Amino acid sequence: QRQKYLYLKSGIYSLPLNLFILTVALTHCVYGFNFYQNLKFAHKFESSKQDSANDRWIEQRLNNFDSANVHTWKQRYFANNQFSTPNGPVFLSIGGEGPAGSIWMTKGHWVTMAKQTGAMLFMIEHRFYGKSHPTPDASLESLSVLSSEQALADIANFITNITAEYKLAGRKWIVFGGSYSGSLAIWARYKYPHLISGAVSASAPLHPIVNFDGYQEVVQRSLQTLGSPKCVQNLANATTEITSLMKTTAGRKILTSEFNLCHALSDDVLDNQYFQESVAGSIQDVVQYNRDNMHFEGHGPAFNISYICHILDDVNLGSPLKRYAEINRLTLKESNVSCLDSSYQKFVSDTKATSWDKATGMRQWLYQTCTEFGWFQSSDSTHQPFKGFPLKFSIQQCQDIFGIPSEIIYKGVQRSTENYGGLSVAGLVTNVTLYNGLIDPWSDVSYMAGTDVGIVSLIVPNTAHCAIMYPASDKDSIYLKKARLDVENAVKEWLGM
C-alpha cells in the first residue's frame, strides 16, 4: 500500500526513489470550487453565478490563533446525506481558491466512493472565497487573517462542531481536495490526525517556491509528447517574433492588431510583460487541463494539445506569429471576450479593489502567493518556449498591489516549508493518496517519488490537472481507471472494509 505506482502501457510498476522526479514544472481543478485556469491571470476565477443551492452556514472564529479575539463569522458549506449509512464514514471536500459549487455534492469520483462506503458528504468553502466573507471587505488589513493555516484551523473546527451537530460521533472523517485544496487535504491529515483518518488528494503542490519556472518546462515537454517537437519550435519562433516587434512603434501596432488587444500596446515594460504572460496563458491552460472531464460543470478549455499544435504547425495560416495569434483569437471567442486587455495598470487597479462585489478571488489568491507560496510561473528557464515575463514581474505585482517586498515573499515561502515540511511531508503522514498527471505542469512541485512513505503516489501518463476527481468518462484511459480503483481500495482499507 505504501508505494508509488506509475501507470504505463506496459503495466503497473513500483519504481525506485527519484526515478520520476520531474526536472521541470495554481489556477486549477474544480472540486467544489472553480480552480484557477492560470495562477495569476485567471479572469474566470469566480463563477459568474454565485451558487446558492442548499447553502448552510457554520460559525467560525475570525482569528483561530488569537484567543483574545472574540470576533466570529459565518462560513458556507454544503451537505448531502443521500448515501449515508449509520456506521459509514464522513467525506469532507475542502474548498480552495474559488467558490464552492453544489454540483459536486452529486458528481465526481468522491461521490462514487460515497456510494460504495455509505458516506455522509460535506463541502466547506475556503475563507475569503465565494460567499465565505469573514470581514467586511478584502482590504490588506482584512487579508491578514487569510492563510492556509487559518483555513486548516477552520477545517478542524468544522469537523468538531459538525460531528456534534449531526451526531456523527464514532464515524471516521476522510478529506478530499485538488491542487491547492489537495495540499490542504494532506496538511490537514498531517496537522490533525486525531480528527482525520485519511486524505485523498489530486495534483497537490507541496513544494513552495518563489520562481516556479519549471511550470513552463513541463508545458514544453507536454506539447512535445502529445503534440510535436515542431509545435514547440513554432511557438518559440512566435514568441521571438513578439519580442522583436515590441521594440518599434510599427511592431507594436502589428501585435495590437494580430492579438486583438483592447487598447494599443504601449512601450511600457510592464504592459509588454503583462501582454506576453496573458497570451502564454492560452497555451498553458490547454496543457494543464488537456482532455479532462470538467465540461459537466459548464466550463473548461474547449481545445486540447493536439488541436493547438495542429494550428501552430499549419503553414497555411501564415507565420508562426499569426498561428499563435489564431489560438488567442479562438480562446477569446470561446471565452466570449471581445478583446485581450494588455494594460498592466488596469490589472493592478482591478486587483486592488477591496469591496466584495469587485474582489473576484484573483486578489485573494495573489495575496496568498505573495505571502505563503510563491509559485510564480516565470519565463526565466531556457528550456521552454515563452519569453517576456521574468520572476521580477511577479514580484513587482506583490509590491504594486499589496506593498509586499521580495524579502517578505521569500520569508513567507520559507515559513510555509518549515510549517508543512515541503515534499518531506510524504514521509510524515499515513493514509494519503496523491494523484498526479504527467502532463500537468503542477506535478513539478508535487510529490512524485519515493516507495516507503505514507503517501501512495499515483502517477498517470497523458492525464491532466486533477483529472482523477472528475466524473468517470468512457474516454478515460485504462491507467486513469486503474488509479481510481486504487484510491477506492485505499479508502476502504483505511475504513476497515
Image: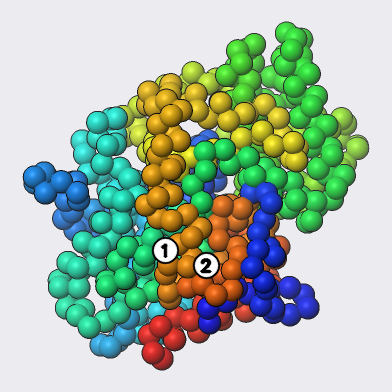
Q: Position of residue 462 (x, y in %)?
A: 71, 63
Q: How is the image coloured?
A: rainbow
The residue at 74%/46% (across/down) is: 220
- The residue pinned by badge 1 equals 186
Residue 83: image quadrant is bottom left
The residue at 50%/84% (across/down) is: 489
Residue pushed farthest bottom?
A: 497
Q: Position of residue 279 (x, y in %)?
A: 66, 33
Q: Nearer the N terminus, badge 2 or badge 1?
A: 1
The residue at 53%/30% (across/down) is: 394
Instruction: Tell me, yes or no, if residue 74 can be seen here.
Output: no
User: Disc 2, disc 1: CB below 8 Å?
Assistant: yes
**Residue 133 as seen in the image, left or right of residue 112:** left
Q: CA distance from mark 2 to mark 1?
A: 9 Å
Disc 1 residue crowd, few under 14, some 14–19, many 20+, Cα 10 Å: many
- The residue pinned by badge 2 equals 434
**Residue 34 as seen in the image, left or right of residue 172:** right
Q: Is residue 225 above or below residue 477?
A: above
- Give the residue type at disc 2: Leu
Kind of element beneath mark 2: strand
